[in-house]
Image (tube, rainbow, N blue to C red):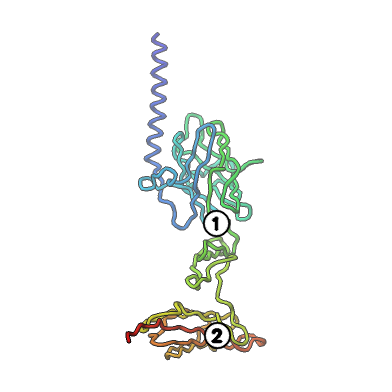
Amino acid sequence: MRARKHKQISSLTLLLMVAILFVVSFFVYLPRAISDTATPINGYAWSDNIGWISFNCTNTASCGTFNYGLSIAGDGTVSGYAWSDNIGWVSANSVDVAGCPSAPCTPALSATTGAMTGWLRAIANGGGWDGWISLSGAGYGPILASNGTFSGYAWGSDVVGWTSFAYATSSYTPCVPNSNVCLGATTLRHYNADCTYTDAVCQFAAYGYGCSGNACLVPPNPGPGTVTDGIIATPRLVRAGNTVQISWDVVNADPASCTVTGSNGDFWSGLASATVTSGIINSQTTYLLHCEGSAVDILTYDAQTTVSIVPTFKEK
C-alpha cells in the first residue's frame, strides 16, 4: 500500500515538473516581433500525434499579446517561432537549431525549387525527446509551390511524428539572384546577387502603368514622328487656377536633348523621364515633348498632351 502511494506521488511530481517546464518555456522564450522585411508563413501544420502547430499569431488572434510567427527572408532563410498547445514554442531561429543532428541546421527554402531544408526545434523538449523536427530527408520535406501553398511533410520522431504542411501558405517568392518580381500591381522588388532586395513603387503606377511581367510598365515609347502617349497630364481636366502632374518617359533618348514646353510658359529640359508639377493652368494648355534619339536609326521623339479647363456657368 505504501509503495503504491509512493508511485502515485512520483507520477504527480513528474507531471508537475513537466507542467512547470512548459510554463517556464512559455515565458522565457517569448517570441520576438516578426520582421517587417520578411514574408510571413501563414496557417498551420498538422500532426496526428500533437495536433495543430500555428505558424502565425494571426491564427489565434494573439498578435497584440504575443507577436509570434515564422517568416522567410529574401535569401530564403526561415526564422521566428511557431506555437503548439501541446509542445509549446517551436523555434526556427539559428541560435536554437545550432547543433542539429545533421547539416544544414538553419531552416531555409530553395531559391529554385521552393523545397525546405534544415530543422525546427521544440524549446520545451525533455523526457528523452530532443525536440528536433526535420524539414528534409529521403522522400519527404515541405515544398512551397508558385501559387503560395505548401505541400509535403516534416518528421518529428516518435513524439511529433509526420507533420503535414498542407494547411500553410506564404506569398514569398523564391529568390533568383539579380532578378525582379512584381509584388502586386504597383511595386517591383529587385533581388541583388546575394538575394537581399529593395522594393520600389513603379514610377507611373498612379497613371495606370503599374507592375506587370516582373517589370514596371511605362507609357508607350515615342518613336520617330508624332505619338500621343509619351507624355501624360494628370488630370487632363481641371478648374482654372489649379495645377496638374506632367509625366513623361522616353527610352533610348539623349536626356540632354529632351525638352517639355507648355503653352502656359512651363519649361523643363535635360530629363528623359520625370514627373513634375505644372504651373498654374488658367486656359487650355498643351505640353509638347521633344527628344533627340540616342541611336542612329532613331532621329526624334515628339509627343504632346493637352489640359482642358472645366467650363464655368455664366448666368445671362
Q: Residue furthest front?
A: 316
In the image, residue 129 lies at what x, y percent? 51, 32
Q: What label does residue 184 carry, if any? A: none
Q: Residue at x 39, y 43 (%)?
A: 30
Q: Residue at x 61, y 85 (%)?
A: 294
**Residues packed near mark 2 inside 10 Å, few (<14), some (14 to 19) or many (20 plus):** many
194 sits to left or right of 277: right
In the image, residue 125 lies at what x, y percent? 47, 34
Q: Residue furthest top?
A: 1
Q: Secondary structure at mark 1?
A: loop
Q: Secondary structure at mark 2?
A: strand
Which of these two is toward me, 148 or 302? 302
216 sits to left or right of 83: right
Quarter of the figure with the C terminus: bottom left
The vertical placement of 173 against 279, above or below, is above
The vertical placement of 234 against 194, above or below, is below
What residue sits right under mark 1 in the picture? 75
Q: Earlier in the sequence, mark 2 or mark 1?
A: 1
What residue sits right under mark 2 in the picture? 303
251 sits to left or right of 200: right
Q: Residue furthest left?
A: 315
Which of these two is toward me, 309 or 268? 309
In the image, residue 57 lies at what x, y percent? 43, 46
In the image, residue 60 lies at what x, y percent? 42, 42
The three-letter code of the residue at mark 1 reads Asp
